[in-house]
Amino acid sequence: MESTPGQGAGRDGSQPPVLRRQDTRLDSYVDRYAARTHGMTASAIRALFAVANRPEVVSLAGGMPNIADLPLDVVGSSLQDLVLNRGLQAMQYGSGQGEPEIREAICEVMRLEGISAHPDDVTVTVGSQQALDLATRIFCDPGDVVLCEAPSYVGALGVFRSYQCDVAHVAMDEQGLVPEALREAVLALRAAGRKVKFVYTIPSFHNPAGVTQSLERREAILAVAEETDLLVVEDNPYGLLGFDADPIPAIRSLSDDRVVYLGTFSKTFAPGFRIGWVLAPHAVREKLVLAQESATLCPPTFSQFAITAYLAQHDWQGQIKVFAEMYRERRDAMLAGLADNMPAGVTWTVPAGGFYVWVTLPPGFDAQAMLPRAVTARVAYVPGTAFYADGFGSRHLRLSYCFPTPERILEGTRRLGDVLAREADLMSTFGTSVSGPRTPELSTHLAPGTNQA
């Protein structure tokens, strides 16, 4: 603080030196960072890991694949053969676009969802997260708008924020992204002078909402994209993990030049290899390769050879069915636990595949504020606000059934039900209503569960 003139004068009449306030900062480099770093924030899911991974806590938060059913003897033998017979090649630098063999194999994987593609148009990435990062990097300038479902994948929102994009959410219903809402959003933003670069969508077994776009809905979304000259970025990590039917054809199968498609082996093989890909129109592919080379020089060569060997030597389609049945059992446990334990007024989606259930709480509940009390009760979830760029979602939460055993899932839903019951008692005691009209962010983009009595 500065001294006041006339106070504390010395014997010779001079004033003492002016003392200026010196604030301290934990990060002394804060003034040196680029402006785009201000948009970098910690993932709400990663922030939960330290607590949620404690053995006494039932974590229904993270989306970690369960690879316990992966045949490790087959994988181990395949890796041994790879090192002995092709080790010098597999452990060397590779192509920035990815090795030809795995790009050919990726095209075969995508055929299961109706996609006919050429290996030259595939760029291998470090998981589909990097695929999304590279796509955003080559398309978006600061201030551009990206359209996303409401809610949307938290990792995607982080990417868009880091590139200083503005996210505009588009309404969902029980079939996912609403085509008419998409059209209205594009036209309104452009009328306001905004530059809309693409719509980002997860059509199959949505993260976090758990809903799936029908083929008719996918065709309608593509029609809106054609009408408005809009690029579609289709993120499809879960498309082969359906429980009851064959995969729905991907949006990319309906258009070669309107869709940038993102895929990954993290959910259908193992996440530790960190191999994903982008299928893009040829001109876009060129930019993606340049961006990949500047970011990593080349994607992990050994991982590419390892996955190629696994696909060639093992019944990988049969293994995906094993995974899907395992996740179906866990999904069923989650739905049974919710039906048995949720208080009246709670609704939830009923996913036909993938990893997640999206829960809506009655008016008056706040999932973010309730989280510390849930963790104290030894159950963890992800609050819905993590999946919105605009602060909405307080009455929602995401539950993941992919990793815990069915027994743990049932126990987790029991604990969560107790937390919600205590929360309702508190609101009743202090006069907070738990009934009333839905808040604006809770428009009908949920397929409700059964416990509405």
Image: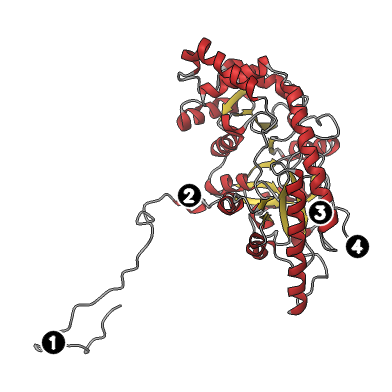
In contact (CB < 8 Å): disc 3 and disc 2: no
Closer to the camera, 223 or 83? 83
Which residue lies at the image location 60% right of the left edge and 17% below the top edge? Answer: 78
- Residue at disc 1, secondary structure: loop
Which residue lies at the image location 73% right of the left edge and 69% below the top edge? Answer: 423
In 3D space, how far apart are the residues under numbered discs 1 and 4 (Cα atoms)? Answer: 80 Å
In contact (CB < 8 Å): disc 1 and disc 4: no
- Residue 410 placed where, x, y %? 77, 50
In 3D space, how far apart are the residues under numbered discs 4 and 2 (Cα atoms)? Answer: 48 Å
Quarter of the rendering containing residue 238 = top right
- Residue 36 - label: 2
Closer to the camera, 219 or 390? 390
- Residue topped by disc 1: 10
- Residue 42 placed where, x, y %? 54, 52
- Which-is-in-front pick, marks 4 and 3? 3
Q: With 41 as the anchor, is 317 left or right in this view?
A: right
- Residue topped by disc 3: 338
In 3D space, how far apart are the residues under numbered discs 2 and 1 (Cα atoms)? Answer: 50 Å
Q: Is residue 352 above or below residue 145?
A: above
In 3D space, how far apart are the residues under numbered discs 1 and 3 (Cα atoms)? Answer: 76 Å
In 3D space, how far apart are the residues under numbered discs 3 and 2 (Cα atoms)? Answer: 41 Å
Q: Residues within 10 Å of mark 2 (few under 14, many from 20)?
A: few
- Residue topped by disc 4: 453
Which label's residue is closer to the chain start, 4 or 2? 2
In 3D space, how far apart are the residues under numbered discs 4 and 3 (Cα atoms)? Answer: 13 Å
- Residue at disc 3, secondary structure: helix
